Amino acid sequence: MRLLFLMPRFHSNMAPFVSALCAAGVDVRMLVLGVGGGEDHAAVVPDVIPVSSRQPFLRAECAADKDFARYATRVLPALAPLYSALRSARPDFVVCRGLTPVYILCALPFVLVRSRLVLYTQGAIVARRGLRKRLGNALILALCGGRWYSPVERKSLHVDRAFAERRMTYIPFSMRVDPLARDRDWCVDRLRLLAVGKFLPRKNHELLVRALGALTDERVSLSIVGEVTTESHRRHYSDIESLVWELGLTGRVQLLVNVPHADMAGIYRSHDVYLQVSSDEPASVSQLEAMAGGMGVIIDPTNGTASYVVDGCNGRYCPPSLELLAPIIAELANSPAIVAQWGRASMDIVDRHHRPEDQVRTFLEMLSR
């Protein structure tokens, strides 16, 4: 079977899944519009499609922005290289990251005529939907033959009058437990907190720093690992750095910038509890990487992948609120046994629910429809 992924760029969170596809005998190729510096290409090296010299759908400020994710859906690819790459790949199935991005719309005629469409989105399978949305989804499901999957089961853990798109397939992100984490230790005399995310306001780094500042317990420390590649990132990083100085937390807060993906496993193993309280997060995978490193997780319940964390088992659900977050951290600082229990439970959840081989089996069953 020849499988082609058509995406803006290769996300490292796809690496375990793609590796398992290749191990299952699937010929995997990937067409992307850009490559990030921290990507893991051990499983597959993506082919980069040149972009057109004319970009009628981009504003000038977007074209100058180095944060590719902010405008990737509006980039017009160079059509000749795009169609040449599609013909060369001769895919049986093409996995498209959504249907509305410009590069997907340009490739869609070829996909529908020569291959079979597989739709990958990060919308919730269980959600509140009106009649218009249901009819629209029915048309999309007919277009892709029911081959539509998402890693998001539900956007909010408590949705009234929810409707499940039964022909959509739930395939959570794949992950393997870090072998070195199975024998890791959790600190009993201090609490090491970790957060990972681009230096953007919606990641709520300010909230995390202020939550630490609300605690007088010197045993609690915080590391923030973030991307700084654009001017907006640099401004926000500077604001957070200033806040750390203002609150007198320089000895307890560490800001790490542009850490290579290969180094992240060691960072997860050297911390105890992961904080994922960013706002408007459709489907984060970093908490799953933290779980694979033996970390408990505190997560905003509106996160699209909050269900990967089991409240009270390997972490806690907590909205992004200083009044709610600070007491939970204070409680954990005095409960090292709970911290260790969460970490072990996290690895068990990854083993039971996120094995790449299991997700590939579900994916291939979906393709056989």
Image (cartoon, grey):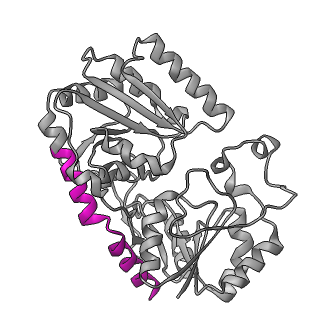
In percent of the image, x 46 and y 39: which residue is there? 279
State the image coordinates of residue 220 (x, y, percent, origin top left): 28, 24
State the image coordinates of residue 266 (x, y, percent, origin top left): 37, 45
Q: Quadrant of the C terminus?
A: bottom left
State the image coordinates of residue 294 (x, y, percent, origin top left): 26, 48
Prevailing SS of the magenta stretch:
helix
**Residue placed most toward the observer, 263 or 288:** 263
* Residue 299 magenta-highlighted: no
State the image coordinates of residue 7 (x, y, percent, origin top left): 62, 65
204 over 343 or under it: above or below: above
User: Which quadrant of the structure image shows residue 271?
Assistant: top left
In percent of the image, x 81 and y 71: which residue is there? 79
Work out which residue is located at the far right of the displayed protein and give it: 54
Over which residues does the magenta segment extend? 341-369
Q: Is residue 18 left or right of residue 77?
A: left
Work out which residue is located at the far left of the displayed protein and give it: 337
**Residue placed most toward the observer, 100 or 200:** 200
**Residue placed most toward the observer, 214 or 156:** 214
